Image: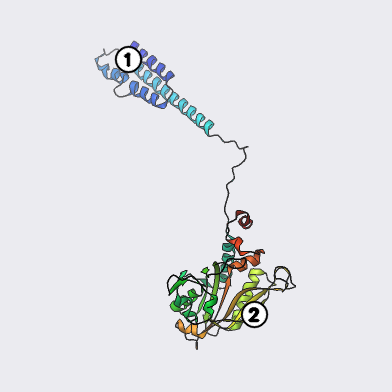
Amino acid sequence: MKDRLMNLQAECLQKLDSANTLAALEEIRVTYLGKKGPLTEILRGMGALPAEERPIVGEIANQVRTTLADALAAKKEALGAAADAARLEAEKLDVTAPAVLKNLGGRHPIALVQEEIENIFISMGFSVEDGPEVETDYYNFEALNTPADHPARDVQDTFYVTEKVLLRTQTSPVQARTMEKTNPPIRMICPGRVYRSDAVDATHSPMFHQIEGLVVDRGITMGDLKGTLDLFAQKMFGEQTKTRFRPHHFPFTEPSAEVDVSCFVCGGEGCSLCKGEGWIEILGAGMVHPNVLRASGIDPEEYSGFAFGMGVERIVMTRYGINDMRYLYENDVRFLRQFS
């Protein structure tokens, strides 16, 4: 029995030496130390041995089991270390190699300026409202004091889906919708895309972006409008910026004005940006027409308000000295990269 145990140990150790995978190692363990293995079989048959041989055979069997178990554990650790070393060798990084740079995109200049304008008015307590780009004739024109026979419609010739449905020409319809569903006081801006059938050139596009604003409350005056736009101009173009109001006509405001800002490059002295005038036109504004208030269910005898609107592209071109609006839509990476 002793010789059998020693031969069993030698046989198992020989197979362990040639095993080179964890799967082969597990097969050897099951074969020699498993419940149906020869070592277990010998231990179960010890009852048939003479009483004086059992302690000797039992001690040898336990030594063989311990030896094989230790050898299996050592081999398993060695195979694991070899596998880790091979994986590290295959996955190692050359930290001296030049990095592979990824091309990262950036915000579009229109998005940058629009967000800046929104933040300025949000800091003054304005909310940001949104509305449909496909609008009805009523909200785009009639609710804004521009009936079907009004000549102002000619300069806002647009894209009609049906006779009464069109792509909005301005974001003003959002103002009308807001006044219908919200009781004064109202203080809001409405940014978004608008559409007009303009020919494409350096200063016109059939699609562009607007931000319009509206304030309605008791006792609102032209002075409130000027103070609001003065603060906006100073935050947008610099603390020394001044505003100038020039009389104008808009059907939805009365009185109305075109608003200029002093040139932030030359300080009003005259330069190429302002074309020597010292002023740059940036928006239109005025007091909300009583008819517009009535159309939205607001009593003009109790409430008054002011409204203003600006083209985002015009602010972008003014801010960055861009002389052709088409650059903003051509997706030329060389141009857009300047704003990253």
Question: Where in the figure is residue 50, as x and y percent of width and height?
Answer: 26, 12
Question: Taking the image as drawn, is residue 16 in sight?
Answer: yes
Q: From what the image shows, is residue 120 above or below residue 95?
A: below
Q: Nearer the viewer, residue 19 or 280?
A: 280
Q: From what the image shows, is residue 50 above or below residue 270?
A: above
Q: Quadrant of the image for the N terminus?
A: top left
For label 1, the residue is 57
Mark 2 to mark 1 CA distance (whole Å): 113 Å
Question: Where in the figure is residue 237, as x and y percent of width and height?
Answer: 66, 69
Residue contact at pointers 2 and 1, CB within 8 angstroms: no
Which residue sits at x=46%, y=83%?
295
Q: Quadrant of the image for the C terminus?
A: bottom right
Instruction: Please identify the residue farthest to the front as the structure is shown.
Output: 199
Q: Secondary structure at mark 1?
A: helix
Question: Taking the image as drawn, is residue 192 in sight?
Answer: no
Which residue sits at x=29%, y=22%?
36
- Is residue 40 rendered to the left or right of residue 281? left
